[in-house]
Amino acid sequence: MFSGKILRNRYFKILFKVFFSLFFVYFLLDAGSLDIYSISEVLDNPYALFSSLICLFLGIVISGVRWWVLLGVTENNISIKTVLSIQLMGSFFSSWLPGAAGGDAVKGILLYKLLDSRRSTALASIAIDRFFAVFGLFSIAICASVFLSSTVFHSEVFNFYNNLLIWGAGFGGGAIGIVLLSVWGIKRFSLHDYLPIAIRSYLSPLGLIVEYYKKAKLQILLSGLLSILASGVVVVGIVIFSMMYDYAPTPAVTAIAGVFGNISSVIPITPGGLGVGEAVFAKIAADLSGTFAPFATIYFTFRIGMLIANIPGMFITLLYSSTHHRNLNTN
């Protein structure tokens, strides 16, 4: 009875998200921001199409290398072959199933099956990897904003989005600082003694993780650089997609709009952010370029490109053997 109610609620949420997604797509089509028929234009540029797909795939792989570095911080010394396999599978499920959380769940399950110890720190690395991914996106957007500020007049619209980027980066950094300060305060003043045992059991791995990261400044720096590289390569892929269309905005505008489109796609109101990312991308591209065109088509094309770039993850999913990778990491 109870499980049936949960199932009905889940179906209702899925239908609700699908409805919202269709609403956004219809709105974009009706407003002229999305032109489905012009997507075929990318087939007229096979070399550019191939280059953009390579960029998207490289972004996935570089993100996997970053995750491998972060796993090593907490002494989860897993083979890079295994980490990249899990990364590609997680990215495949993130693209082909509703929501990025689905890919993270797959990565968590595979890690749990792979390891017999240090599971909590390994699973925490998935969330930490997300923070680094967002850091990379904001870094690229801020770089594009700086470049754009040197080439265009500082309008109120530009200043608004520029401030939004700065505030977003500041908020993320502040949130991390608050978490670290809270963990330090709890340990310094033994505040955990006043907490229920159940909560203490959850905080214990968190304190251990903080201790690991305090000693891993080089790995943190490397992870940050890999985040910027991964995001930069993906943004280059988006820019190449945009250049296949006559109405494409400047590369800097495309980069800023692409970052906001990626971040907004994480908002769980539609399956995989379909429609939301396109709407945000089109709005920002139109505002910063001062022109109206079917800009949402660019981001929709990028979304299709991500589906294609994640096809290798599908084959790895079919061939992946938990036993083989357990043996690989125990020898």
Image (spheres, rainbow, N blue to C red):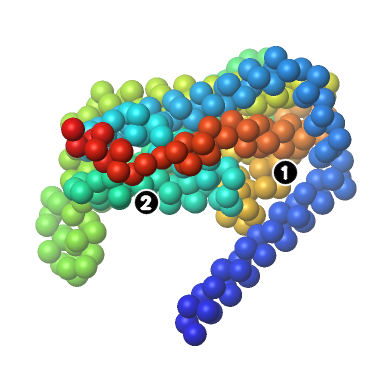
The answer to which quarter of the image holds residue 191 is bottom left
Q: Is residue 184 above or below residue 150?
A: below
Residue 279: assigned label: 1
The answer to which quarter of the image holds residue 174 is top left
Q: Is residue 37 above or below residue 251?
A: below
Q: CA distance from mark 2 to mark 1?
A: 33 Å
The answer to whether 127 appears left or right of 47 in the picture is left
Most foreground residue, 36 or 135: 36
Residue at 72 percent of width and 44 percent of height: 279
Identify the secondary structure beneath mark 2.
helix
The answer to whether 217 appears left or right of 88 in the picture is left
The answer to which quarter of the image holds residue 215 is top left
Name the kind of residue labelled 2 in the image: Ile
Q: How far from the left and from the top, in percent, is residue 147?
A: 60, 17
Q: How far from the left and from the top, in percent, is residue 10?
A: 56, 68
- Identify residue for label 2: 109
Q: In this view of the protein, can residue 184 be seen by the observer?
A: no
Most foreground residue, 64 or 266: 64
Residue 314: assigned label: none
Residue at 53 percent of width and 45 percent of height: 94
Instruction: Locate the C terminus by quadrant.
Output: top left
Closest to the camera, between mark 2 and mark 1, is 2
Q: How far from the left and from the top, in percent, is residue 230?
A: 48, 25
Q: Circle 2: is it few (<14), some (14-19), or many (20+) Cα within 10 Å?
A: few
Q: How far from the left and from the top, in percent, is residue 42?
A: 77, 24
Residue at 43 percent of width and 51 percent of height: 105
Q: Earlier in the sequence, mark 2 or mark 1?
A: 2
Name the kind of residue labelled 1 in the image: Ala
Residues at badges 2 and 1 in contact (C-beta under 8 Å)?
no
In the displayed orientation, state which residue is furthest to the bottom: 1
Residue at 62 percent of width and 37 percent of height: 307
